[in-house]
Image (cartoon, helix red, strand yellow):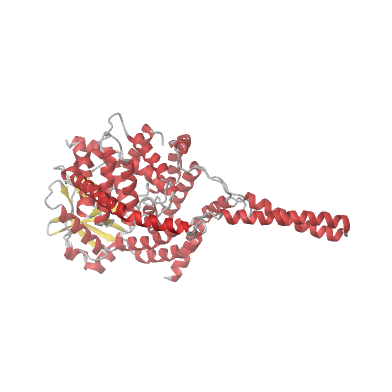
Amino acid sequence: MNLRAYWRFVLVTWQFLPLVLAYARDRRRFLLVGGRREVTPAQRRQRAASLLDKLLTLGPTFIKLGQLLSTRPDILPPEYVDEFAKLQDRVPPAAWPDARRVIEDELGPVEERFEDFDTEAISGASLGQVYRAEVDGQPVAVKVRRPGVETLVEADLRVLRWTLPVLMRFVGEARSFSLETLADEFARTIRQEMDYHREARMLGEIRANFEDDPDIRMPTVLEAHSTGRVLTMEYIGGTKITDVDALDAAGHDRTALAERLQRAYLEMIISHGVFHADPHPGNLAVSEDGALVFYDFGMSGYVDPFVQEKIVDFYSAVARQDIDAILDALIEMGTLSPEADREVMGDVMELAIADARGEDLEHYRVQQIVRQVEDTIYEFPLRLPSNLALVLRVATVVEGVCVTLDPDFDFIAVATAYLREEGHLAAGAREFVGDRAGELRDAGESMVRVPPKLEAVLDRVEREDVRVRADIEDSGDHLTLLARRLLYGMVLAAGLLSTAILYAFSTLEATAVAGLLTLAVGALVYRSFREGGGIRAQPQFTRHEMRRRTENEAAVGYGDVERVADETAIPVTEPDEAIDAERDDGDGE
């Protein structure tokens, strides 16, 4: 294991070294000296495409890492999140003899356990592959863990641990914390996805929640033919959900399908608290009778009741266009930093809703709102809870599928109708009345408590016994920089004076020594003013800045982005293409 980890470390270093050098030069133009370089959105997008290509080259662990990073806008800039969202878990399947060895190690001879077994895999992924077979005359799908993937993943996890301290040097303090927690989260997630016992348990739990719904279909697990490395499930055929021509030919109502899909995920997240977290088109299909079919439950998660409540608050606030309530919900969920400027964030949310809203005031896209929030999360970094990050990503991917089915699909209208039917909006009104009553009670108590406290404070002022302590928050070490400049300046002034005096009254040798020392101090003064940590402020997310970023994105052009994607052989799924097309038709981003 150690030898393999060392070899993988060499390969990873070789792949990432050019990008690491580029990032280092962003901080110091000539690595050791020089100022910062400004990186444009177009350059970041090109780097993201290059990095994505390297993740694909390095194999299963790094493909999964890219997929996880695509759900973490608190760690990566928006350009990287967009590129990594194109990662698809599709790689050529392993050779049948290797897969057969896994099946027989777990279940015994293939011919004895299965009546028929098609040795051509119907799908291949980074961690497993799926075959068709028959058990007791019934068609089944057999998911087999990729041979040898366990040792490869464990070696790569060690490599990631070794490289983490290097990555810390290129990120700020807030993102350093996010990276450390991400490493733990990723190791746990990828081990869970390799555990087919867990996938079977999650599939059974989610399926049981929809057992009485004939419009939702999920496969049953054949426990006698399933282990931690082999998962045998009922085979359910269907038409890929984004194959609109085939759906139209079969006579399916695409608008009804989009609404059914959206309501299914709302029910999973808000009502059940356990959800299927990988809704890309390869995992969704439509059966002959029009039921939605869900596949692949390796990525599944739980939502705790507190987050469920705050998601309801968020949707309700978006429906009411209540900016303060939207920000409160995001802060309470941990999606937005409490230290963020509410006025700036209010402008961001107003613009997001205005950009997404059509002539009908109720018609706007939650995906565009989430994208604007994701951009702002990167400007105000914080750590997203892992399952909440999955929820955010599920919301955007599901809406992309729904828009592919129906370009005029109204996400918010469906969400609002669902919340109203489930009684969440009515409960919100009762909570509002309760909150106002609590505020009145607190105000009454304060009116009784404040006068005695105020009198005590005034007595201390009269006795001149009041002390005021002020703490100065200087996260950028601006005061330290100012003090260093003042010190250098005083030493430089003294050096110039000493050099002049020595030149007039002493030897040339003494003058030369003083002059060299003075020049050295002068160089330090010049360098301190060239550092990027000067005392200045720059707006990060104002109306003007958003307009400038939009213009820059439009200037790059999707032709360049598609060219980079083609050169790096990035597979793009249909919903991503639909989302990109919608952006291009809408606001040019």
Q: Is residue 502 above or below residue 2?
A: above
Judge left or right: residue 514 versus residue 397.
right
Q: Is residue 135 visible in the rendered structure shown here? A: yes
Identify the residue at the far top of this view: 359
Q: What residue is shown at x 30% (from left), y 28% (from top)? A: 359
* In the foreground, 573 or 307: 307
Name the spot of residue 503 as percent of width and height, x first: 86, 55
On-image quarter of the N terminus = bottom left
Name the spot of residue 164 as percent of width and height, x first: 47, 62
Q: Is residue 172 above or below residue 38?
A: below
* In the foreground, 445 or 582: 445
On-image quarter of the C terminus = top left
Tag count in the figure?
0
* In the foreground, 54 or 435: 435
Judge left or right: residue 77 versus residue 196.
right
Judge left or right: residue 136 versus residue 462.
left
Judge left or right: residue 374 versus residue 462.
left
Q: Is residue 120 visible in the rendered structure shown here? A: no
* In the foreground, 436 or 128: 436
Identify the residue at the far bottom of this view: 2
Name the spot of residue 281 as percent of width and height, x first: 28, 45
Name the spot of residue 364 as percent of width and height, x first: 30, 36
